[in-house]
Amino acid sequence: MRVNLTVNGRPQQADDVWEGESLLYVLRERLGLPGSKNACEQGECGSCTVRLDGVPVCSCLVAAGQAEGREVVTVEGLADLAGRRAEGGELAPVQQAFIDAGAVQCGFCTPGLLVAADEMLERNPNPSDEDIREALSGNLCRCTGYEKIMDAVRLAAARQQEAV
Amino acid sequence: MTPMPADKAPTTISQGSQTKGGIGESTLRPDGTLKVTGEFAYSSDMWHEDMLWGQILRSTVAHAEIVSIDTGEALATPGVHAVMTYDDLPTAVRHYGLEIRDTPVLAHGKVRHHGEPVAIVAADHPETARRAAAKIRVEYRELPVITDEASATAPGAVLVHENREDHHARHVPHPNIVHRQPIVRGDAAAAARRADVIVTGDYTFGMQDQAFLGPESGLAVPEEDGGVHLYIATQWLHSDLRQIAPVLGLPEHKVRMTLSGVGGAFGGREDLSMQIHACLLALRTGRPVKIVYNRFESFFGHVHRHPATLHYEHGATRDGRVTHVKCRIVLDGGAYASASPAVVGNASSLSVGPYAIDDVDIEALALYTNNPPCGAMRGFGAVQACFAYEAQMDKLAKELGMDPVEFRQLNAMEQGTLMPTGQRVDSPAPVAELLRRVKAMPMPPERQWESSEGADVRQLPGGLSNTTHGEDVVRGVGYAVGIKNVGFSEGFDDYSTARVRMEVVGGEPVATVHTAMAEVGQGGVTVHAQIARTELGVAQVTIRPADTQVGSAGSTSASRQTYVTGGAVRNACELVRERVLETGRRRFGAYHPAWATAELRLEGGKVVTDGGEVLADLVDVLEGEAVEVEQEWRHRPTEPFDRRTGQGNGHVQYSFAAHRAVVEVDTALGLVKVVELACAQDVGKALNPLSVIGQIQGGTVQGLGMAVMEEIVVDPATAKVRNPSFTDYLIPTILDTPTIPVDVLELADDHAPYGLRGVGEAPTLSSTPAVLAAIRDATGLELNRTPVRPEHLTGTV
């Protein structure tokens, strides 16, 4: 089948899609956007988190056909998205904060965490620690022990507050 | 960072401390931007024109003879390009293994564990490959399963491996024992008679999974010369290469290996997974072949941490001195040897912990069973022992009526202490100090979950399940400390290689560092650039991708890479610097006497004297010439342990961490919330403090997982894995994880580059027993197994 969708603001078309393919597979293998990750393909780890019409979802659990006509934002589109919110430059604030705080080790969880954290900060610009933990509880990280991820999200929030 | 006492400052640093971005600074990862934008290419992201997808068919039973394999229907499936079984392997070399080549590339006549590879398929779509693999008909005749020590050594027990010829075969008491290492020092029996108090315990340690997030994956591309280029996520390129090439029947230079992005490792990528399978299919089809495991397959696709049963006896005098330790550690190695022999060496030599105990009687062994193969995981044999000896230390303290921390401090080893192996610990061993520091950290507030709006359930056991608002919740505090070796041990030639080049690019001196070190997330690439800046005084450092075009770096394991490949990079930089200075002397020596007389260094892109006087710009010295050195580097050699007594200087360096855990337990439901997990660790010298703390916190949380949630459950009747998914095998989420305050101590080891001490593993050891001790403190229960599950806390088991 053919799937038409908007990814990171650009209309995209994927051909010869087998009905069983996930949105994650189409992004990674057919649209050249491997930033969304394939850590479990079971909806447990959050590494494939993208926004579907603004809502964070595990793209491994979304059938490609379900994305027909919808808007998807992946990690590759975060900087542009931040730009549309008049934030940041080359990188979205949350991306820069992950680098600065040492929240990236192997980095495999990073894209999903970034999409989830960015969405939370959009809703809740001044989150408590417990708010951050709750919002990111669907994203597994095996390297960092999450402390630097907490630091990064706090840093991104603080920088956003300063910028306002 | 905690200020270090001046008299303990490393004495080995003499060069270039003025260059920005050098060692000791928290410089940021060079791959950070790529990793946050999604552009960093992990092994599962590889893509090639005309690429096929590989799929592995795995055994559905744990132990069986293969009666027949019928690939006909699979081969006839449209889109399928190749199906291969054992009979299709191209050469007589059909097994691989880290130390013992006992693992079949594809099963031959027999499968020995659930999930063993039996056949491989290449097809034009991953789903086509999966469906074709499912059409391969394998007829099994099931055999009895060996699942524990009793079944492995019972009279007439089926042998997991018949006709063993490996170098451990002759000294083990039974063919179902991979390796056994006794250690005897002093006279434990006589010492036991001096003891006023003796405590014994039997402990059980579950099977932990590395659960790295990036699944096993890679892309094999056939090359025009008949060779193959493999883009792969691994911990040691050259070890892979040595195992892959003979199976393919290719000389090593025709198997080119490039490290792709590695999504974590933790020991789980020491063994081969899909490497040979992808290469075989690529060479068979003449097309690039990509294999990517899903999570289900990943649980079968790599070795796990050895589950263990441990028996300990400790004695002490009334005044709190440990008299002796007797222990027996039985590790389940599963169906293939993997790293079991080395894990046995660690478990035995580190079995009494960081304590000064002169009379010991120790035995550790690993079994061959039909359980999943076990091998390397962060902490490598030291983790299981630490869980048991720290439980014993608490038991002894309780029996003596002593404070558990003071009791540990009283028996703590220090520099100069002899290990059970007779090896003298010849660098700082601040065990008592780490305990003091971790105990001195401020405690988290009581009832921290209370707020003006009532209980914040997110901070309570059970969390958002909303199972308590504080009723039945009891707090406990526990301490533990551990000892881990750094580097490969027992006489292994544990070298690394670095190639460093210095040249002028765009009017600026630039250093290029090329090693085969596997960057798996630990930050080795960051540290290499820092070392080059410090040693060569340049701002710009390029880190070349790791591949087999340069000599071996050894494994990214055993907390060794900053020490060994870091040491190799420093050494190569020093050689480059000497040659640059020689060139400088030749060109400019006549103009300034300091060229001949002064101690010179490279700093800020210039040649400067000790006193800081600038002699020349590096740009002028190099003048279009490139200086390049490739050199192997070795740390002090180690020795094998004596087979009967276990004596020998077997380890390179020791590493120490201590934890304090604060937990809250809902005693009605058996739910645990870890409130805080504080750590103090000696790192010798923090080359990159930010990365060091990241390692300590990450290791700490893997230990937390082992304490309260992580376990691969294997059915004892069938040896089949029951929970191969992240739905059923739980690793800590950000909600399960507490704050982790870290106190870093830097006492230089004069034998190591910059005085550094390997960091990555020690925090994984003491974290688990600290959490267990805290749960015991809260509940009063004995808790002799880990992980602890709710039923262990509510008396329903």
Image (cartoon, rainbow, N blue to C red):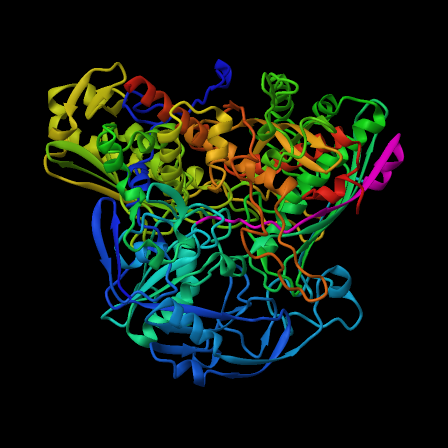
Q: Does the magenta stretch include residue B199?
A: yes
Q: In this view, does B382 lie above or below B587?
A: below
Residue B688 visible in the snapshot: no
In depth, the one of B682 and B284 nearer the eye is B284
Q: In this view, does B28 lie to the left or right of B667?
A: left
Q: Is residue B281 magenta?
A: no
Quadrant location of residue B455?
A: top right
Q: Position of residue B163 (x, y in %)?
A: 64, 74
Quadrant location of residue B166?
A: bottom right
Residue pictured at 73% horizontal, 62% vertical: B173
Q: Is residue B428 left or right of residue B578?
A: right
How many numbered marks does the figure carry?
0
**In the orientation shown, which residue stands out farthest toward the front?**
A69
In depth, the one of B116 and B134 nearer the eye is B134
Q: Position of residue B610 (x, y in %)?
A: 27, 17
Residue pictured at 54% horizontal, 51% vertical: B726
Residue A82 visible in the snapshot: yes
Q: Where is residue B153 in the image (x, y as percent from the top left)?
A: 76, 65
Residue pictured at 32% horizontal, 23% vertical: A160
Q: Position of residue B45 (x, y in %)?
A: 33, 54
Which range is magenta?
Answer: B188-213
Q: Is residue B631 above or below residue B744?
A: below
Q: In this view, does B762 lie above or below B254?
A: above
Q: Is residue B112 left or right of residue A13?
A: right
